[in-house]
Amino acid sequence: MRTTQALFKLRGSIHPEYFKGLARDKDIVAMPLPKQLCVSMAQHLGAPAKPIVSKGDHVLKGQRIGEAAGFISAHVHAPTSGTVTAVEDGPTVTGTLALRVVIEPDGQDTPANALPPIKDWTTAGRDTILARIADAGIAGMGGAGFPTRVKLSPPPDKPIDTLIINGAECEPYLTADHRVMLERAEQIWQGCEIMRSLLGVKTVRIAIENNKPEAIKAMQTAIAKADGDVAICILKTEYPQGAEKQQIFATTGREVPSGGLPMDVGCVVENVGTTYAVWDAVVNGNPLIERVTTVTGHPVAEPRNVLARIGTSYADLLAFCGGLTCDAVKIVSGGPMMGIAQSNLETTTTKTTSGLLFLEASRVPEYTSMPCISCGRCVVACPMDLLPAELSNRIEAGDYDAAESLNILDCIECGCCAFICPAHRPLVQHFKMGKSRVILKRRQAQTKS
Amino acid sequence: MSNDTQPYFIVSTAPHTHSGSSVRRIMLDVIIALMPAVLASFYLFGWHAVRLTAVCVLGCVGTEALCRRLMGRDLGIGDLSAVVTGLLLAMNLPPALPSGMALVGCVIAIAIAKQVFGGIGYNPFNPALVARVALLMSFPVAMTRWHDALNPARWLGFAWTVPDATTTATPLGLVKTALTMKQPLPLTWDNSTMLDYLLGNMSGCIGEVSALALLLGAGYLLFRRCITWHIPVTYIGTVAIFAAILRVVDPATNMPVSFHMLSGGLMLGALFMATDMVTSPLTRRGQLVFGAGCGLLTILIRRWGGYPEGVSFAILLMNALTPLINQATRPGIFGQSRKKK
């Protein structure tokens, strides 16, 4: 069998309650077109795309409506055919404003067919494939949304020898990646082969937590005939196995150096959804205009894994899942550990919306934060081996220099420390603030010199 | 479309879930863990143990509430930390100590050793130990007037108020006197004395004598993951190693290892006082250093110091070093101990 156990244990981790059972066994269902789609130009990490359509234009499904603005950026496409009713500022998932294109679907779903399918990608050539991935607007669908083209074309001085496919899905509640692996294993493997040839690597590790035995089995079948060093790497179920640096460590034993990138240790990590999107873009010529989002939480009438067009409002997603059976007090875009709380349901899905979580009052207890009692649990839980307790005290005292020397910039904001803290200290909040202050300080120092 | 039935949704930073742990729960666990030793002290020392425990717990909680109120802050007694301090202080007192002196100890522990520094989390020294040492300095006679456990008079309430009539020295006290007087070691050490010491049938502070009850409680704390093995094992281990060395070098003036393990406040100190989260190091490595330091100082004071027992001083001294140890034992972070295949 092509399976290996993870080579290395995480340096720190937590074991939250997972609640994956809510949606784990629900097939991916395609959601009918909503009345309106609001496609944000800020879909990914880096510069938002520049809209290239205006109000009144008629667009076709898959037509480019936003142009990548800069190197770290990605194109945005119309999720269906219809009329542009507005190009305006709209709320993003982080609460800021960004330009968005509002489309009223015409119900025809007429495809633009702008990208011809590349059936035989093995002979198409590296540049053609890379151009296709860029043209399809693919960005990392695991969370950060890093433009995939950039990731797949590392500079020549960074040799890559391992491709890691991230199917850990370590966030509680979320099951989108699980379902994608289960239902689209063969396509994921094809996408994987495409990326493998782009990078010229032999070694592929598909990392899956051991709480997803069905997905492991499906992927095993898919890679049965693969050649080269290809294996499913079974990870222990603990959070944060899906974090990029932790996953590289677990599967290869390599540590991404402080301040470095996966390519510094010869690795590229791609999410399973992204891998599927690469296959779909290359072989079928489909730009990235839809994704699987888990709509879940105990208040949701029918938790589901929904295949929805990008730009679908959270309200429409919830309605498709039968609405709420009891009051929810918190809506989280993403998982409970790193997701972003939403003040309303007007926000729309993007390429990175892996889940939409509704929490009832009993799961959102209110805490008053206390002084740190130095129990040291955060130090044990931190997967980056930082000292969250001390960092938080320093930041509370406004000592950002000390925070910097305590390596605050290495914090991955996974939330393990805050999850475990008996004093309920707002650790992640402190670190987010501290990081931005340290980065600002560095920038100021740079402009001065 | 906004949700009409909802007045608002809570917006806060991730994570949106919590392990459910709390300071209160930790303190409650410590209280539960102390119960075997507290009950043992009631049995062994009778009414006086009950009296001291009640005075100290009420005194500490009262002082805490009063201090917080004077400072215009919320009462803060809900976290139960003052209860823990009260219990620990009582366990560190000799049975016949007058209630008034115990109350002075409560005020020192909470007002001076804790609230002056900012309350829970900010105190550099273990409050109960500060109070114990302050009492030892202030009331040297009362603090070293010992009574045998299981004394038939122990349930007669005021039976021990007649000074010196029934007092005995602690085992460590006897050894210390013999050492200073250059006399031979005063104690016979056989299996039956060892059993007595294990169960707590000797003189000493009310909560320190029963090693068995303390170990039972520590087992619970380990099970609940409120403490880890690092400090207790290195502390007791270091004492054992040095006691063994001394015994080998000079058996005539040094008691055996098991005597050092079971006498005095070692178990109480190593299991419950040195493991105090606030005043001990943050990292595992730091805790190993801390435990070893406590052990070394304890045996040094016991053998060569001016006091028969050194646990309180050893822990307080190491408390003072905790910030330094924290600084010296910072872990190398992920990505800095870079190892490439």
Image (cartoon, coloured by chain):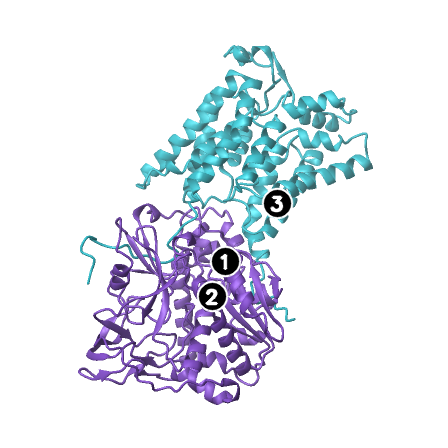
Chain colours: A purple, B cyan
Instruction: Where is residue A83? Give x, y as percent.
Output: 20, 80
Circle 1 chain? A
Q: Nearer the viewer, residue A163 or B121?
A: A163
Q: Along the horizontal axis of the image, is A430 left or right of B172?
A: left
The residue pinned by badge 2 equals A181
Task: Determine which quarter of the picture holds residue B116.
Answer: top left
Mark 3 falls within which chain? B
A448 or A65: nearer the viewer:
A65
Q: Residue at x 33, y 49 (%)?
A: A364
- Screen quadrant of the N terminus of chain B: bottom left
Q: Is residue B286 above or below residue A401?
A: above
Q: How many marks?
A: 3
Examine the rendered structure and indicate whether residue B102 appears above or below residue A428: above
Quarter of the image with the C terminus of chain B in it:
bottom right
The reply to whether the C-beta atoms of the residues labelled 1 and 2 are less than 8 Å apart is yes
The residue type indicated by label 3 comes to His
To which quarter of the image does residue B260 belong?
top right
- The residue under label 1 is A212
Assess disc 1: are there few (<14), some (14-19) or many (≥20) residues with their C-alpha within 10 Å of its C-alpha. Answer: many
The residue tagged 3 is B230
Left or right, A435 with respect to B208, comes to left
**What's the CA distance linking mark 1 and mark 2?**
10 Å
